[in-house]
Amino acid sequence: MNGQQLYRRARQLIPGGTQLFSKRPELYAPDIWPAYYRSAQGCRITDLDGRTFTDMSSHCVGACLLGYACEAVDQAVQKRIAAGSICSLNSPDEVELAERLLEGHPWAGMVRYARTGGEALAMAVRIARAFTGRDAVAFCGYHGWSDWYLAANLGAERLGEHLLAGLSPAGVPGGLEGTAWPFRYGDLAALQKILQQHAPAAIVIEPVRHHLPPDGFLDSVRQLADQAGAVLIVDEVSAGWKFCRGGAHLKFGLQPDLAVFAKAISNGYPMSVVVGRSDVMDAAQTTFLSSTYWTDGIGPAAALATLQQMQQVDLPGHLDAIGRQAMTVWEQLGQTHAVPTRAGGLPPFVQFGFNHPQETTLQTLFTCRMLDHGFLAGPQFYPTLAHTPDHVMRFAEAADAVFAELRRGLEQDDLQDRLQTPVRQTGFQRLT
């Protein structure tokens, strides 16, 4: 059974076909994008059909900043597995990891662990509610799949401007209506209105994503949280370690009450952390937060090894350089071939786009042709330590030929005819 056949089977057995929305092949090139991998190393992936690709896409949505299968991290995990990954007692690595994290976050005093970003964010919101005795949450940006977040779409769709449109709150208790209130990043007036009308337990923000924070925005959010008695939670699940060692909030001088880390903190192994002020974190003892697999030894071992590796290199500087190189290449390709392009976002989160009414068709055709050249490429590129300037230049050489075809397709108005697949999906769509 080849990869496409297996994926068709998966859609019969698994609702939605994949466990992570971002890994749906329909978001890239339906019926063509490889759904499954056999092996991954650095930034190279071999799919189920034996084809090898250089990953110039979202690189597992930023979970492996050191590259796939980092030897030092894998060795630490293998050592832990050989000694037993879990048992009736606790892993001592939990304490060492806590000490390491608190050394890098002097504003904090305690930590709690989970294994995914969504779990850790739900934990942070629970702690904030327990600490304040309030229910409502104000937030901007994307923060996962949990009830506390999707409750924003009860009564009205409010999440469309926060990454995903069309998300149904089906299964979220109707009693949560009015407990989740989004505001636009940078819109202090909207946040002030929420604080005045709903007195939230917490303000949840990503310190940075695709745009730098407006001058004074983060400081003002901190001040508003203090005035309202709300717990300020920074979601570093995506941004953590990309902009600054220890998290983007440190780069921008923001002192939160709680910070949530996952993904890159353990370079491909399940691990997440809530770091916070001691008085706020102590509220975790007034509620119930407990899970067997939050105590496995693999996550902390991977995190310790990952943090050690990150201390030995200028990871944010490397991501910035590779990301800027890729953005320049994209803009130059557009100029050379008279294809209307845009390179947006920030260097660790490069966004590739086309300023054209047929943007999704152009993106899909580009992805299909880049697969023929041995590259996984789509609307995003998240650089890692494994990416080198040579990878970007080889990407540029392959894309040069593809852009020439895109230009011909625009001139001859036959982009759709050149595709052997439907155009890629955008946003949240139900798969039938």
Image (tube, rainbow, N blue to C red):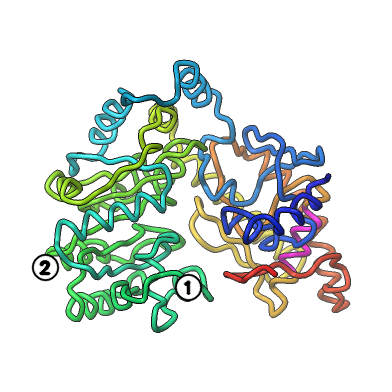
Label 2, secondary structure: give it.
helix
How many C-alpha atoms fall within 10 Å of the one at disc 1: few (<14), some, or many (≥20)?
A: few
Q: Residue at x 44, y 42 (%)?
A: 316
296 to 209, vertically: above or below: above
Query: Does residue 312 appear in the picture of this structure?
Result: no
At label 1, the amino acid type is: Ala
Count of numbered circles in the view:
2
Category of crowding for the residue at label 2, using alpha-carbon neighbours closer than 10 angstroms: few (below 14), some (14–19), many (at least 20) = few
- Say if 379 sits above or below 111 in the image: below
- Label 2: which residue? 227
Compared with residue 302, is residue 47 higher up or lower down, i.e. above or below? Answer: below
The overriding secondary structure of the stretch rendered in magenta is helix
Q: Which residue in the structure is indicated by mark 1?
A: 170
Q: Secondary structure at mark 1?
A: loop
Magenta residues span 362-370
Residue 90 in view, yes or no: yes
